[in-house]
Amino acid sequence: MSPGRERWVKDLYRIGVFSKISKTTIKTLRYYDEIGLLKPAQTDCDNGYRYYTTDQLVTLHRIVALRQIGLSLDEVAAVLNGIQAEAVLKQRKSEIEARLKETRDQLSRLNHYILEMKEGKKMNYNAVVKELPECIVYSKRFIAPSYDSYFALVPAIGAEVKAANPNLKCAVPEYCFIEYHDSEYKEKNINIEYCEAVVDFGVATGTIKFKKIPAITAVSVMHKGPYSGLKDAYAFTYKWIEENGYNAAGNPRESYIDGIWNKEDEADWLTELQVPVLKK
C-alpha cells in the first residue's frame, strides 16, 4: 500500500468499525448505500471495502433521529436534501397528534369500562363512536300523544309517502329513526320527527317533506328489549358522553332495527340510540 493510500485509510473507518461506533448494522449501512441515502466516502476498487468519515457519522445520526420520529426512508431523504423538509415534518407532526388523540380516546373508554366492572355493573350496554353518513330522508314532525301511539302513527306516514311516490325506494341498508325535539324527557305530547332514508327526493305531501341531512359523528348504543327500557340506555349514553370527553351536539335519534313488524316477542326488539357528539 502506498504512503498516500495509508494516510487516506487512517482518516476513514472501515464499515465494520463504523457500524460499531454508530450502533448501526452492516446490513443497514449497505442498504443505505444501495438506495443512495448514505453512500461511503470511499470504496476501495481493489477489494470493495467501504470507508466512512466522521462527518458521515453526524449524517447517520440525523438519519436515525428522523427514523425514530417515524419518517419513511423516502421522507428522510427529502429532509436531508432540503426538498419540502418543513412540509414533511409538519405532516408527520399532524399524524402523531391524530394518533395521540386516538390513543387518549381509547384510554378514556378503557378506564370507563374498567370502572363499570369495578362497580359490579352488568355490561348491558356498550358505546361506539361512529360516523353517520349524509343521506336523503322523508320526514314528518308532529306531537305524539304517547309512545304507544307510535305503532299507529308511523305506519301511516309510510303509507302516505307510498301513495304519493309509488316507485320511491328506501336506502340500503334501511335507516329509519325518530328524532326527539323536546329539551327534556316527556311521556306525553312528545315533539318528534320521523325520518326514513331514501335513494332520491320524492314528491312531498301536505305534512311530509324531503330533505338532505348532513353527516354527523354520533355515540351509538344498542338496546335490546321493549321500548320502556330505553330510559336506561339513555342514562348510560349521556353518562358515557360526559365521562369520555364529548359534548352532546344535537337531538338524540332512535333507529329501529327490529320491532313489532318482524319480531313477535318484544324482548327481541333492537333499537339503536344515536346521539350526535363533538369532542371537547
Image (cartoon, rainbow, N blue to C red):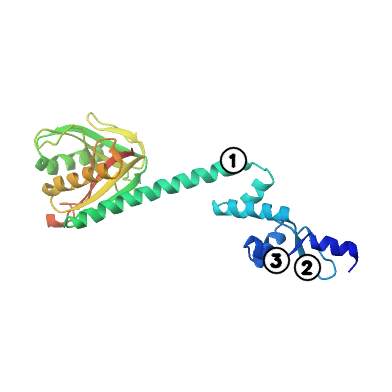
Q: Nearer the viewer, residue 265 or 187?
A: 187
Query: Which residue is under mark 2?
Result: 49
Pointer 2 or 1: first along the chain: 2
In the rendered view, tell whether residue 29 sits above or below residue 236: below
Q: Which label sits in the foreground, 3 or 2?
A: 3
In the rendered view, tell whether residue 31 sits above or below residue 66: below
Query: Which residue type does callout 3 highlight?
Result: Val
What residue appears at the point 63 percent right and 42 percent down from the top-left corner? 85
What residue appears at the point 68 percent right and 55 percent down from the top-left corner? 57
Query: Which residue is under mark 3?
Result: 17
What is the secondary structure assignment of the residue under circle 1?
A: helix
Residue 238, quarter of the rendered image: top left
Pointer 3 or 1: first along the chain: 3
What is the secondary structure assignment of the residue under circle 3?
A: helix
Query: Do the residues bearing badges 3 and 2 touch, measured as CB atoms within 8 Å?
Result: no
Query: Do the residues bearing badges 3 and 1 touch, measured as CB atoms within 8 Å?
Result: no
Q: Most extreme residue toward the top, as rendered?
A: 206
Q: Which label sits in the foreground, 3 or 1?
A: 3
> Which numbered circle lies on residue 87?
1
Pointer 3 or 2: first along the chain: 3
Q: Nearer the viewer, residue 135 or 200?
A: 135
